[in-house]
Image: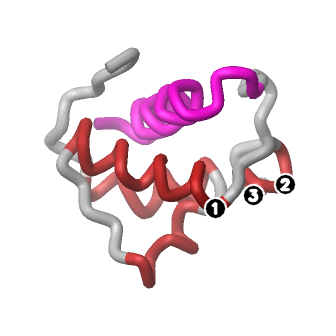
Amino acid sequence: MTRDEVILAIKDIITTIAPDEELDGLNPAERLRDQIELDSMDFLDIVMELRKRYGVQVPEEDYKELASLDSCAEYLGPKMADIELKVGA
């Protein structure tokens, strides 16, 4: 998966979890929680969806690496390099 595909995958997961959130115009460098309404349960759902859809395990100590779209792409990019994008899963 490319960097842009990782970001698209994260946005698709967020859309599944929080369908009322507007994701167009998100600043990729800014913390997601500062831009959209995500509580801790939503965040755990994101982590669970990453595991369910892509088989990617994110240990609790690495949750901070998923704070922004940029940090998601940086952290998940190597873990998802050989995985095919699944949108709308």
Stretch in magenta: 1-21
- Left or right, 16 with respect to 87, comes to right
* Circles 2 and 1 in contact, beta carbons < 8 Å: no
Give me the C-alpha separation between circle 3 and circle 2.
5 Å
Local packing at callout 1 (Cα closer than 10 Å; few below 14, some 14-19, many 20+) is few
Left or right, 10 with reference to 27: left
**Residue 40: which numbered mark, if any?**
1
Q: CA distance from mark 2 to mark 1?
A: 13 Å
User: Element type at marker 2?
Assistant: helix
Which mark is in front, 2 or 1?
Answer: 1
What amino acid is at disc 3?
Arg
> Which x, y percent locates residue 71?
56, 60
Q: Residue at x 77, y 23 (%)?
A: 22
User: Of the residues tagged 3 and 1, which is closer to the observer?
Assistant: 1
Say which label, 2 or 1, has the lower sequence index.
Answer: 2
Percent position (x, y) of residue 36? Answer: 80, 42
Residue at image mark 2 = 34
In this view of the protein, which residue sits in the foreground, 44 or 33? Answer: 44
Instruction: Please indicate, yes or no, whether residue 29 appears anywhere in the rendered image.
Output: no
Q: Residue at x 39, y 15 (%)?
A: 88
Farthest residue to the right: give it.
34
For residue 31, which numbered disc appears in the image? Answer: 3
As shown in the figure, which amino acid type bears the numbered disc 1? Ser
